[in-house]
Amino acid sequence: MASLTVWKFNSPDGAKEALTKLKELNKQQLIVIQDAAIASWPVGKKKPKTQQLANMAGIGALQGAFWGMLFGLIFFIPLFGLAVGAAMGALTGSFADYGIDDNFIKTVRDKVTEGTSALFLLSSNAVMDKVQDAFKGTEMELIQSNLSKEQEAQLQATFGEE
């Protein structure tokens, strides 16, 4: 079963640094990284820069549409002319089918602000004590939404590569 986690860092570069650690843990088979994306919000900018990390080995479980819609819901990034209002409400409702509810979106929106960064990670098979040890001393906050097997399969079917 996959877990969708959001790791919030108190600097614009924290998520990138965390990903470097996670890549090493992935090589050691201490976590399986299925997909990931970063939101980095430099001081003085009106919105975060986002990036899907599709070039990693094992990545590619979800298409950019998933990350684009999720980031749009969280940070109100314009989505190909999609009207905010009712359309955003419909998207929020459909994300709940994947274990990403209004509370998850609101929490991430409230915590990932200017001067911070976040790593959005779809992972599985984490050896939690080893992962925790790798991040000792790192200032971060973990916001987690666990996906059931059914939610994971539905997420992959809807947003996965064909």
Image (cartoon, helix red, strand yellow):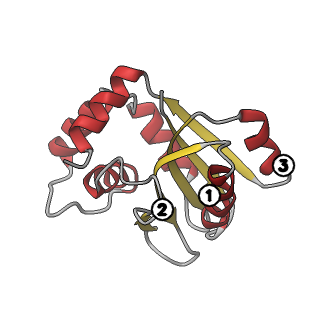
Left or right? Give the position of 14 relative to 37: right
Residue 98 visible in image: no
Image vertical order of residue 10 relative to residue 33, above or below? below
- Which mark is first along the chain, 1 or 3? 1
The residue wearing badge 2 is: 56
Left or right, 80 with respect to 159, comes to left
Of residues 118 and 154, the one nearer the viewer is: 154
Q: Is disc 1 placed on a helix, strand or loop?
A: helix
Q: Amino acid at mark 1?
A: Lys
Which residue is pictured at 63% across the width and 70% down the height? 13
Q: Give me the disc on residue 126.
A: none
- Left or right, 69 with reference to 80: right
Picture quadrant where residue 50 is located: bottom left
Q: To which residue does mark 1 refer?
A: 23
**As drawn, is 10 to the left or to the right of 47?**
right
Disc 2 to disc 1, how far (Cα)? 8 Å
Residue 34 visible? The answer is yes
Taking depth in this image into account, of 103 and 30 the one nearest to the observer is 30
Q: Position of residue 19 (x, y in %)?
A: 61, 60
Residue 2 image point, x, y percent: 48, 32
The residue that disc 3 covers is 136
